[in-house]
Amino acid sequence: MPTALVLQHVAVEGPGAIGAALRRRGVAVRSVRTYAGEPVPAALEAEALVVMGGPMGVYEHARHPHLTDEIGLIERTLAAGRPILGTCLGSQLLAAALGARVYPNTRKEIGWHEVELTAAADDDALWRGITPRFTPLHWHGDIFDLPDGAVRLARSALSPTQAYRHGANAYGLLFHLELDRAQIETWIAAFAGELVETGIAPQAIVDDADARLAAAAAVATTVFDRFAALLG
């Protein structure tokens, strides 16, 4: 049975719909919980790597030394040509491993915001045929330059690169498609202080969830199933 290794930085930020898609394809999911002190493997003993989100910044490796270990593992996974999927912080770590600059945006992008696919998504293995505009949940303050050799697949009004591909099978998604309503409510409770700081009403995120989640979930099912298929 093929295996996907998941790097998880926060207890409430599990793989969600990504893990479900992998399991549907007969892929075992093994998590490394860096928040619990579990070490990042020096080598990828799996067929794919999934890197989840978290509140820390890529550049905060002095406070979170495991981030340096993760970038090293991402670099070795890229060199081996194995599939990679990075979400939010994971997309930023992938960008950093590819030599791109990661830095704070002018303001945080939190809540339900529209994403627009680029023309390059039309023939992409994961994104072809997906509706060109959809509205996922966002929860990030950092953005990154498009890595050299990467293809921009999606953008938003505030973030020039919301999704990208490097090579044939390394993908970064800045937004969150992996969430269901229960996970969203858990996040709101866990990160309530950040919402207060940014002036975002938690109830507004919850109130919009039912209207937004069905369309976002349809995109997630297709995109994550296609990623899982990259494992063969």
Image: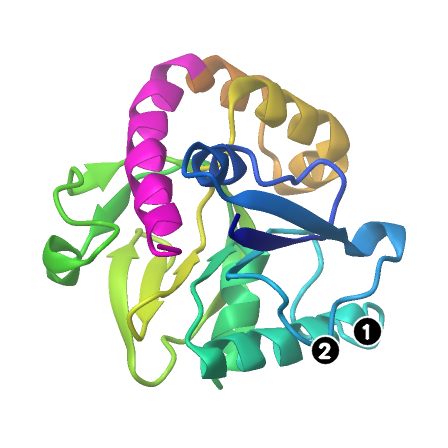
The numbered disc on residue 193 is none
Residue 116 in magenta stretch: no
Determine crowd level at label 1: few under 14, some 14-19, many 20+ residues with C-alpha closer than 10 A: few
Q: Label 1 is placed on what type of residue?
A: Pro
Q: In this view, does 132 lie to the left or right of 107?
A: left
Front in this rendered view, residue 80 or 111: 80
Circle on res. 68 = 2
The part of the chain drawn in magenta is 210-232
Corner quadrant of residue 189 = top right
Task: From the image, give the main secondary structure of the stretch colored magenta.
Answer: helix
Residue at (26% x, 51% y) in the render: 126
Residue corresponding to mark 1: 65
Helix, strand or loop at label 1? It is loop
Q: Which residue occupies the foreground of this view, 67 or 192?
A: 67
Asked if the residue at tag 1 contacts the one at tag 2, i.e. Cβ–Cβ closer than 8 Å, the answer is yes
The answer to whether any part of residue 149 appears in the image is yes
Horizontal side of 139 relative to 171 (left or right) equals: right
Could you tell me the amino acid type at mark 2? Thr
211 on left or right of 45: left
Residue 70 drawn at (x, y percent): 67, 71
Q: Dot 2, crowdedness within 10 Å: few (<14), some or many (≥20)?
A: some
Q: In this view, does 183 lie to the left or right of 143?
A: right
